[in-house]
Image (cartoon, rainbow, N blue to C red):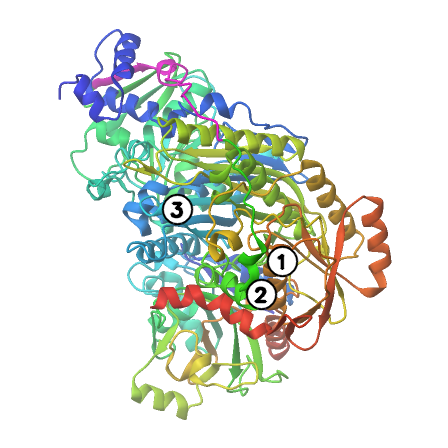
Amino acid sequence: MKSSVITFPGSNCDRDIDVALKKFGFKNKMVWHADVELPKSDLVVLPGGFSYGDYLRCGSMAAKTKIMQSVINFAKGGGLVLGICNGFQILVETGLVPGVLLRNKYLEFICKNVFVKINNKQNTYFKSLEKDVLEFHIAHNEGNYFCTKDQLKEIEENDQVALYYCNQNGDTAEQYNPNGSIKNIAGIFNKEKNIFGLMPHPERMIDKSLSGEDGSLFFKNLINNLK
Amino acid sequence: MIVNEQVAIDHGLKKDEYKKICQLLKRTPNITELGIFSAMWNEHCSYKSSKIHLKKLPTKGKRVIQGPGENAGVIDIDDDDAIVFKIESHNHPSFIEPYQGAATGVGGIMRDVFTMGARPIANLNSIHFGSPQHKKTKNLLRGVVHGIGGYGNCMGVPTIAGQTSFDSSYNGNILVNAMTLGLVKKNKIFYSKAAGLNKPVIYVGSKTGRDGIHGASMASANFDEKIEEKKPTVQVGDPFTEKLLLEACLELMTGDSIIAIQDMGAAGLTSSSIEMASKGNLGIEINLNNVPCREANMTPYEIMLSESQERMLIVLENGKEELAKKIFDKWNLDFAVIGKTTNSKKIELFFNNNQVASIPINTLVENSPMYERKWKKTKMPIRNKFKKEVFKNLKIVDVLNKILANPNICSKEWIWQQYDHTVMGDTIQKPGGDAGVVRIHGTNKAIATSVDSSAVYCWAHPLTGGKQIVCESWRNLISVGATPIALTNCLNFGSPENENNMGEFVECLQGIAEASEYLKYPIVSGNVSFYNQTKDDGIKPTPTIGGVGLIKNYSKMITMEFKEVNNLVLVIGKTEGNIDQSIFARYILDKKNGPPPEINFFNEKNIGETLLKLIENDLIKSAHDVSLGGLLTAISKMCIKANKGINLKKPKLLIHELEYFFSEDQGRYIIEVHPNNIKTVKNILDESAVHYDELGTINNSNELYFSDKIKVTIDELKSSNTNWLKDYMNK
């Protein structure tokens, strides 16, 4: 399986996701933001970080780069695009997934482990994954997912919510919401479920010495579903 | 502008120093030259009050590749890998503008590290604030934490350990010390010594603006009521540009184009150009019209003294300009050839085709002032005699809950959760333990690191305090299973012109030197910050030690939380019951005099090395050094982190229980041992003549239990420990 990771100026989780993808069997290529052509890929990843310093609005500058036009075309053709953290912010800025990401409710950067509940397994990302609740890790300042009532209705009708913040038993009560996201939403699909944006970093959970290993489950499952 | 004595004094120079400048130049300097002298001769850049004392520090060791004198120290961690590290203060700017002050402190220290060719792999910080009740404390703390996070998080470097304290002596002078560790291959280390004639001098990074002019001079003076006026001397950070600069520099460093490289930190273009030329025994010529400027009509004076951030000066090999420019263009950074090396041994500046400065470099560096300041020795305070009645009305549980919630003991999760501590995917021990640990990417090795200071001990008796902080740093590394290798220090003191403050400096430094010598734990880099003083009130002496140790196989790393029910818990090292200067004495009994706990080098070394041996032989399940708050505080923290309880045995007591549980006797660790190994462990401890007490057994009841005197749930201890800071900040 071939994957591509786009490096924008200010990306800083590009190496981490490269390590993770390779560990679980992807042949990964790093793609520079100024490139125009996307290499042949089964999966494109927009990594975490602070693209263009996130100075204008998180992800907004990256969304307008040349390479993103190729990514958008790839996604519209049904290609798998995964946006993690800043990558998720870029996805909402391109409009590939609905909604926006506001500043965290308590106006502070948060770095910690969280639990997320998988809402929908009818897609390449989660099909056949045994667990329903995963322990992931978040590290962000603007992860407070928000959308209009109409959008929310549409998202729910189309089963586009990928992940909800919850406790280890899958309880999605408000108290397990780390950043104020509407309905505890941690990750969202497009209608067709080939584009997936999430705030947590599965790539930081790929080794028992790190924060945990549920990221390994995610990547192993993903490559199996692609085979 | 005409230069005279008054102008020189306004620049922070002393009358004598101005006279010396005129003598050295054999003329009156012009304003640009005066600015350069004042920048190079201020305390921050010249170390004029500390130099003669710093020479006494042990700086050599078999793993030391580079000691003090470069941008950072370098140590060998085998397999051609080396760690570059340093700590630096950004105290004055952080008090005036906490967000930018702290942010640029972090940016500056990271630049020091990647200037040497190393990719930063971990950040740490040691931050000290005034009394929690003081009106400025909360905003300063919030601003500093946001600033550190804002910069480090954006750079994608994990912040893995730190230290925070509160003390009213910091009410008017907070401390912000930032430390960075970087990884480099031994044969790819870059230095700041220029070499060769007519080599192009290159400016890269951000444009030069009017921010931070005379920042280093500001950091070399006492604060007074007009301090807010100095806001424009605080630099503004741009972590995004620094991230680009990091990647661009490391890309250029893969080739062989660079002869010397130096970041523009304190005193900007002035100190970077002069240091490179001075080390190479060369001259340097700069055309200031070629310096990329952010604002129009900047004068030579402003360009030379700006402390705009995210800039580097490079001496390149001839003919490599195009190649280098391509790399910096790719990263959208400014690149300009601004001068060349010469054999004049002068710094010569040109602007609009006129020479605007010409100063022999030795007058700025070798001939800079050096003072042997007067200093006063601190007598060892007399020990307090506590009568048993004092303890009578105190319940151990109440004392414990209070101590766990003390601002200097409580959990600092509110702070470190705002720092990305897991980016780069190699953090295997997060903040909140004895030391942070990161793996060396792709290997079985890991590096442990911590920052430590004990201002109260240093204030009570500077010599003992100086020894203690080195030992504490050593202990923190050993507690996670690392062999301590070397340290960096950040020496935060009041005014050197005050003989008490100077005495604190001299004696703390002596203590540091003695401990470092004995433990073979050399000092490879550091920074001195004097004038942490508002009017006549100086801070408590706060030397900070940043320690670095190596774990050869990270599967042997130790963490502090208790692991398994029925395992046995021991304390190694002797508990004598000295409570003077302990949190218990100062905070519960309100007794603030007396000597700090004694340091016994022999025991310290012996106990530490024995513990490392136990760890190496897989005999230890968890370990934690006993420090602030004493034995019961340490045990509670191990329980809280594990969510496990303990049954404590009644110790053979010659001292009062409160003294036993809360004294801060040094050189002690708590260890957890599986019952199957207890015999072996005791044998090794006996053979090594290490004193130990059996403390008890880990239970499955989630309670801390001690005869009929303590019965408390771990949840209760946990809320005492974790709530204070959160509640304080959210109130």
User: Which mark sits nearer the N-terminus, 2 or 3?
Assistant: 3
Same chain assignment for discs 2 and 1: yes
Q: Quadrant of residue B595?
A: top right
User: Which mark sits nearer the N-terminus, 1 or 3?
Assistant: 3
Say which chain tag 2 marks: B
B518 left or right of B271 in image: right
B255 versus B698 height, above or below: above
Residue found 41% across the figure and 49% down from its top = B128
User: Which mark sits nearer the N-terminus, 2 or 1?
Assistant: 2
Q: Which residue is mark 3?
A: B242
B20 versus B582 height, above or below: above
- Count residues near mark 1 (Cα–Cα under 10 Å), then give few for <14, some for 14-19, many for 20+: many
- Residue type, numbered disc 3: Glu
Which residues lie in the magenta part? B354-378
Report, in whole angstroms, how far the alpha carbon at label 1 lies from the one at label 3: 48 Å
- Residue type, numbered disc 1: Phe
Where does residue B594 sit, x and y in percent of width and height? 52, 42
Foreground pick, B96 / B638 = B638
2 and 1 marks in contact (CB < 8 Å): yes
**Residue that protrudes farthest toward the bottom in the picture:** A157
SS of the residue at dot 3? helix
User: Which numbered dot is residue B396?
Assistant: 2
Residue found 47% across the figure and 33% down from its top = B71
Residue found 53% across the figure and 81% down from its top = A167
Foreground pick, B575 / B479 = B575
